[in-house]
Image (cartoon, helix red, strand yellow):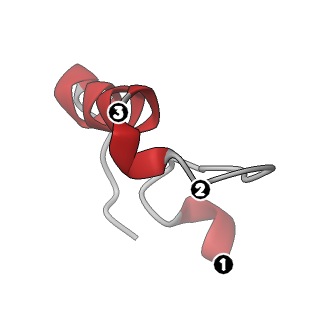
């Protein structure tokens, strides 16, 4: 666990990935940006 809030830039990186052609084959996925909090 990172024990800090995400920087806006870290969230923006996921948004850019999802908007890019690199994510063309990603379907029905949940992307959790919580610093590992949901893993415990």
Mark 2 residue crowding within 10 angstroms, few (<14) / some (14–19) / many (20+): few
User: Could you tell me how far apart the alpha carbons at marks 2 and 3 are, in whole angstroms?
Assistant: 11 Å
Quarter of the image that includes the N terminus: bottom left
Q: Where is residue 18 shown, x and y percent of the image? A: 46, 35
Quickly name the residue at label 2. Answer: 25
Query: Tag 3 or tag 2, which sits nearer the N-term?
Result: 3
Q: Residue at x 37, y 39 (%)?
A: 21
Q: Residue furthest right?
A: 28
| Kind of element beneath mark 1 | loop
Quickly name the residue at label 1. Answer: 40
| Kind of element beneath mark 3 | loop
Mark 3 residue crowding within 10 angstroms, few (<14) / some (14–19) / many (20+): few
Q: Where is residue 28 shown, x and y percent of the image? A: 81, 50
Q: Residue at x 59, y 56 (%)?
A: 25
Q: Where is residue 5 shown, x and y percent of the image? A: 34, 37
Q: Where is residue 33 shown, x and y percent of the image? A: 49, 46
Mark 1 residue crowding within 10 angstroms, few (<14) / some (14–19) / many (20+): few
- Residue depth check, mark 1 versus mark 2: number of the one nearer the observer: 2
Relative vertical location of residue 9 with respect to residue 32 in this rendering, above or below: above
Query: Horizontal placement of 26 versus 27: left or right?
Result: left
Quickly name the residue at label 3. Answer: 20
Check contact, mark 2 vs mark 3: CB within 8 A.
no
In this view, the residue in front, 20 or 37, is 20
Q: Residue at x 42, y 57 (%)?
A: 35
Quarter of the image that includes the C terminus: bottom right
User: Could you tell me how far apart the alpha carbons at marks 1 and 2 are, in whole angstroms?
Assistant: 29 Å
In this view, the residue in front, 34 or 23, is 23
Relative vertical location of residue 12 with respect to residue 17 in this rendering, above or below: above
User: Could you tell me how far apart the alpha carbons at marks 3 and 1 are, in whole angstroms?
Assistant: 31 Å
Query: Tag 2 or tag 1, which sits nearer the N-term?
Result: 2
């Amino acid at each position: 666990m990172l024990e800090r809030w995400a920087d806006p830039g870290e969230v923006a990186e996921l948004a850019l990935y999802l908007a890019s052609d690199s994510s063309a084959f990603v379907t029905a996925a949940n992307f959790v940006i919580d610093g590992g909090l949901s893993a415990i």
